[in-house]
Amino acid sequence: MTYAQNMNGYISARGRALALTILVSIQIVTLLAAAAAWASYASTLGHDLSGRMAAAAMATAIGSFDTLLFYAATVVFFTWVYRAMANLAPLGSMSTRFSPAIAVWAYIIPFVNFVWGHTVMATIWQESQPPAVTGDGVYTRRSTALVNWWWGLYLGGIVLVLWTTVSALFTSPRSVDELHSFANNQILFMIIRAVTALLFILMIRGAQKRQDEQWQDLERRRNVPKPTAEALR
C-alpha cells in the first residue's frame, strides 16, 4: 500500500524519516571522525606542534561540516514532527495536547524546549498505536524508554558543551594537562552526540513504523466488506 494521497487526513512521513536517517547517519560518521581528530590532537601534545595544528584544523573543518548537517537534519525533523503529530488524529488518537504547529514550536522556544521537546516525542511515540492490552483486558501505556534515553543524552551533551565552553572562557587552556583535558572533553562530547544520534534514528524509524502499521491495519479493517443480511442467516 502507498500513501501518496491524503486518505482521511493521513499522509505517511516515511520519506522524511528516510531523509532523517540518511542525514543523521552521515552525521554519526562525521562525529566519529571528529572524535578521532581530537584524539590525534591529544596524542601530539607536547612533542609535535605541526601535527597538533593539523589535527586541530581537521577537527575544526569536520565541526563545520557537522554544523551544516545538524541544521539540515533539524529542518527535516521539524517537518517530520509536524506531519507525525498531524497523523495522530487519523490514526485514532484522542490526544489533543499539541497541535502540529505547537509541536514544532516546542523545539524552538528557549527553555520550554527542555521539557516540551521530550513530551512531544513521547506523545508521538505512545499515540501512534493504541495502548497495549494485557490478558486481563487492562490497557497499559507504552514505554517511552527509548525517548527518555535519547532526550537524557541530548541534554547531557548540552550540559557538557556548556561546561567546557565556560571553562575555556575563564581558564584558557595553556598547559599540556589542560589541553589534554579539553581534548578529552571534546572526544567525550562527540561520542555522546554519536550515541544520541543513533538513538534518534531508532526512535524516528520506530515511531514511523508504528504509524504506517497502524494505518495499514485501519485500512484493512475499513476494506473488509460488511456482512449482508443473507450472510447472517
Image (spheres, rainbow, N blue to C red):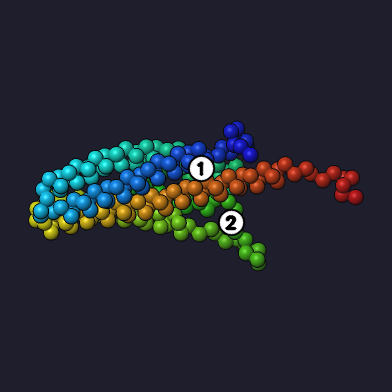
Q: Is residue 44 visible?
A: yes
Residue 119: x, y in percent?
A: 44, 51
* Residue at the image point whose x is 49% and y is 47% from the top: 205
| Amino acid type, label 1 | Ala
Give the numbered dot on residue 145. Answer: none
Query: Taking 79 as reference, is 152 above or below it?
Result: below
Q: CA distance from mark 2 to mark 1?
A: 17 Å
Q: Secondary structure at mark 1?
A: helix
| Residue sitting at the far top | 5
Residue on which the image places disc 1? 84
Q: Secondary structure at mark 2?
A: loop
Residue 134: x, y in percent?
A: 62, 64
Q: Earlier in the sequence, mark 2 or mark 1?
A: 1
* Residue at the image point whose x is 57% and y is 61% from the top: 140
Residue 4: x, y in percent?
A: 58, 33
Residue on which the image places disc 2? 131
